[in-house]
Structure formats: C-alpha cells, structure tokens
C-alpha cells in the first residue's frame, strides 16, 4: 500500500460537478493498493497517517498530529501511485491491485482511518473520474509505502 499525504488548509473531491467530499485544515490522503496488502498494512498506515507530527505547535515547530489539532482527513483512491516507469514513457500499472481487490481494501482502509482518527472521513468515489482540489500547506507532502516498514 502506498499513500501520498498532503497537509492542507482545504481540500475537496468533485464528481460530475458535485462536491463528494471536502475538508478544511487536515490531510489529503491519496491511497493505492497492491494484491498482497493485508489488514496489517491498512492498520499500520492509518496509525502512521493519524500520528504523523506534521502540524505546527505554538512555537511553529512541526510537532502536532492531525488528531492533536482536531483536523480532518480526506481519502481518495489512486491506483496510479503504483505506476512503473522503468521502461519507455507509458507507465505500467500492472502492480496496482485490480478493482475487485482494491475496492474492498480502500473501503476497509477508510473505516480503519475513521476508527483511528475518531471521526467520519470524507472520501472520493472508487473508480470515478474525480477532480481533486487542494491548498497544500507548507507545502508538506509525504509518501508512505507500507512495504517499507522496517
């Protein structure tokens, strides 16, 4: 499982001209899955996201988590995170889990994030053509791969 986490002052995902999910201060999480992702990958990644100390404290030091500041998390599925670009100029997505595997993983991941964060998590819609807007704060962008835990 790979995620790209962006600290934002606002973010939203729009589908067919209608806002499907939006947040204010918090984290936009783009999530991609592979066939061998497990519940452990979901749990570890969710805990890492919610616990990341990337928000400023009163001394302007990144020392607080999204949970500490009462922020929100918007989760959007993105299979292109597993693009292979070694050969040629057309990315290969063979490593990304097929929809019948990745959709249940995505849905479960959202639930896990909600449980760790302690509140509802807005989302995009799996497989939809989504327009994602964000105002990256910092900018702060972090990439996490659950296969690189050690």
Image: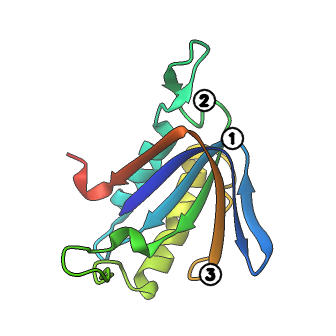
SS state under label 3? loop
Image quarter where the N terminus lies is bottom left
**Is 43 above or below relative to 36?**
above
Mark 2 Cα within 10 Å, few/some/many (few <14, many 20+)?
some
Instruction: Determine the residue located farthest toward the right in the rendered image.
Output: 18
Image position of 10 (left or right of 42):
right
Q: Residue at label 1?
A: 25
Separation (CA) of disc 1 from disc 3: 24 Å
Q: State which quarter of the image contains the C terminus.
A: top left
Instruction: Please indicate, yes or no, whether residue 44 appears anywhere in the rendered image.
Output: no
Across and down, in percent, residue 107 comes to 55, 70
Give the residue displayed 34% in from the left and 78% down from the top.
96
Q: Is residue 103 above or below residue 114?
A: below
Between 147 and 19, the one nearer to me in the picture: 19
Q: Earlier in the sequence, mark 3 or mark 2?
A: 2
- Residue at (80%, 74%) from the top-left corner? 18
Colouring used for the render:
rainbow
Whichever of callouts 2 and 1 sits on the residue coming sooner in the sequence is 1
Chain-order first, disc 1 or disc 3: 1
Residue shown at the point (52%, 40%) measured from the top left = 139
Q: Which residue is mark 2?
A: 68
Q: Disc 2 and disc 1: Cα gap in Å?
A: 12 Å
Q: Which mark is residue 129?
A: 3
In terms of secondary structure, where does tag 2 sit? loop
Task: Indicate the secondary structure of the residue bearing disc 1.
Answer: loop
At horizontal 47% and vertical 37% (from top left) the residue drawn is: 51
């Amino acid at each position: 499982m790979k995620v790209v986490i962006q600290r934002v002052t606002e973010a939203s995902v729009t589908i067919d001209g209608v806002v499907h999910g939006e947040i204010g201060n918090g984290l936009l999480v783009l999530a991609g899955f592979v066939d061998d992702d497990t519940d452990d990958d979901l749990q570890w990644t969710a805990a890492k996201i919610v616990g990341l100390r990337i928000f400023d404290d009163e001394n302007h030091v990144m020392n607080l988590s999204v949970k500490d500041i009462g922020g929100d998390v918007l989760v959007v599925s993105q299979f292109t995170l597993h693009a292979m670009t070694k050969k040629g100029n057309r990315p290969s997505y063979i490593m990304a889990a097929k929809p019948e595997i990745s959709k249940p993983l995505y849905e479960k991941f959202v639930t896990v994030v909600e449980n760790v964060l302690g509140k509802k998590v807005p989302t995009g819609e799996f497989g939809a053509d989504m327009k994602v807007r964000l105002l990256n704060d910092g900018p702060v962008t972090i990439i996490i791969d659950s296969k690189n835990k050690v």
